[in-house]
Image: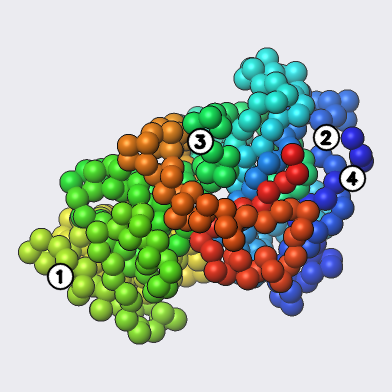
Amino acid sequence: MADSMWALVYDRKADPWEQTKGLRPEQVERARIDIAKDYKDASMVLVKPKLAGFCGSDRGIWYRRAFHDMIFNSLDNEKRDVRIIGHELLGEIVEVGPEAAREFGYKPGDIVSTESHIACGVCYQCRMGDTNVCITDRIIGISTDGCFAEYLKLPGHSLWPTDTKKIRPEVGALQEPFGNAVYACTKVNLRGKSVAIIGCGTIGLFAIAIAKALGARKVIGVEPLENNRRMAKAMGADALVVPGKADQVSYVHDETITREIHDLTDERVGVDVALEMSGSNAALNTAISAVRRGGHVILFGLKSGDAVIEDFDRVIVDGISLHAVVGRRIFETWHITRNLLESRDPNIHDLIWTVMLNRGDGTIVKFSEFDRDQFEKKINTQPKVLLRFAS
């Protein structure tokens, strides 16, 4: 193998955070397993990506709106200036450290996805089973090098074997973000419940199909973009609400959304569960105002900085429960994800391929043909874009 490889990176010397956007293709040192240099490599696996998904987190890095501190602090610790981005993948194992081979049975040629949160396994959270909020948690593509590269090195304990006879590769590359929606939809029991999903981007679209599969009685999508509303309907939404012209810069809830959601529920009392997937402060308060007394609000949308809860007394007096969701339950959520995607009743797998990925038309970009301007157009018009690597 050559000593270098191509990767899509954020280079803090070449691209000052406040004045730039996008990622740049660069030749970097090739990832390799070298036990003589680092004994920890015995538990590592070298993976050659086949497909990699571009995530909302990657969009935050592209536009310099998120993860500045995590990237810069980790680069400071590593005494480097370049971070390889990307954390959603399906790849082929090309080399296995001896401990990873012994403990997990991995071998060259195996097809895997990966959990993006690398847990330490020894902190209090990990020992309590809360590995998704490990105290020393590293995230690939943010605080350690990611999968927008010809090779990457990952710990064997983070990998997830994938059967491409049951899950097509393009869908298999999306198990990590799909798992976000699975975790959000399993935070509380949705069977027989009315559910509002505020924000029908990628994770919101996944959540619509998952909520229906888990037995939700009625799923209401809230989305301003017409194309996303079309996909939300195709993914199984029973009703759709178009946001009004509320000031989304402020924290005040959107009364139009609240009123319409209440009108769509039994006795106009509000939904049982609201999933806030957008990250805006106004949407947070809209979610709270849309649920019934005793209802649940699932918080997944992420935005840095402070937020204001409007009419905070109502949250307490009305017995509304707020639940934060980050990442996935490792590996509980992955097992549910596998079952939902391998099943064809309901056929979420094919909905993702035909509706969200448009059967690959306009949603898949060859890694070798990456063009910054053209790629930006795609991530601004498609709910999900995949990079395809040479086999």
Q: Is residue 388 left or right of residue 341?
A: right
Can see residue 303?
yes
Say whether residue 137 is visible. Answer: no
Q: Residue visible at 38% across and 34% down?
A: 343
Picture coordinates of residue 113, whole percent (x, y): 59, 37
Name which residue lies at 75% across and 32% down: 46
Q: SS at mark 4? A: strand
The nearer-to-camera label among 2 and 3 is 3
Which callout, 1 or 2, points at the residue further toward the start of the chain? 2
Mark carried by residue 32: 2
Location of residue 100 (image quadrant):
top right
Badge number at residue 345: none
| Residue beneath disc 4 | 4
Q: Position of residue 188 (x, y in %)?
A: 28, 45
The amino acid beneath tag 3 is Ile
Mark 4 burial class by Cα count in 10 Å: few <14, some 14-19, many 20+: some
Which residue type does callout 2 highlight?
Answer: Arg
Crowd band around label 2 with a 10 angstrom C-alpha radius: few (<14), some (14–19), many (20+): some
Q: Which mark is residue 167?
A: 3
Q: Name the residue nearer the viewer: 380 or 155.
A: 380
266 or 340, which is in the foreground? 340
- How would you rate the neighbour count of disc 3 (Cα within 10 Å): few for under 14, some for 14-19, many for 20 or more? some
Q: Which residue is mark 1?
A: 263
